[in-house]
Image: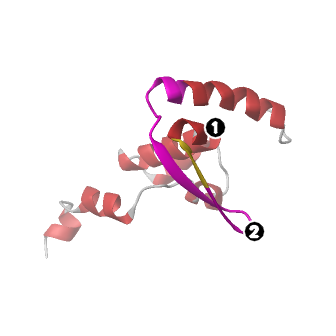
Amino acid sequence: MPKKFDPKVVTTINRPLKEAARLAGLTERTTRTRRQGKVVEEVADKSVFVSSKTARESFFSNMLAAGIPRADAKKFMGHSEKDVSEGYDRRTLEEIALRYAEHPFFTTW
């Protein structure tokens, strides 16, 4: 894997990801809000927003949702710094709460 960011590599990876997402039916129109110095809203098919970054975020969030401990999931991601992986967790508070609603810690009071 290259040590420095190479936009050509990212484009080469993202093009087939976007096409696979489109073929999988991710064509619903959606709004994405980005904050890069200012708020920017974009409206497009969901497949347009799929990228190697969103794939990594989904992979990490799905590992956590499946019960893989955060420390182990972080190792799968190849991150040595905890802070990098933290930004990848896209689960909502409601998703986390539902997962633990029946956990003995919360039900044995």
Residue at 50 percent of width and 55 percent of height = 89
Amino acid bearing label 2? Gly
* Residue at 78% in and 30% down: 9
Magenta segment boundaries in residue numbering: 20-41
Residue 53 image point, x, y percent: 63, 43
Which residue in the rendered view is the most extreme toward the left? 108
Looking at the picture, how far across and down is residue 18, in whole percent?
59, 31
Which residue position holds label 2? 37
Residue 82, compared with residue 108, is above or below; it is above
Disc 1 residue type? Ser
Categorize mark 2 by other alpha carbons within 10 Å: few (<14), some (14-19), many (20+).
few
Separation (CA) of disc 2 from disc 1: 22 Å
Q: Quadrant of residue 98?
A: bottom left
Which residue does the numbered mark 1 point to in the structure image? 52
Residue drawn at 29 percent across, 64 percent down: 97
Q: Is residue 91 above or below residue 11?
A: below
Q: Quadrant of residue 85?
A: bottom right
Q: Residues within 10 Å of mark 1 (few under 14, many from 20)?
A: some
Of labels 2 and 1, earlier in sequence is: 2
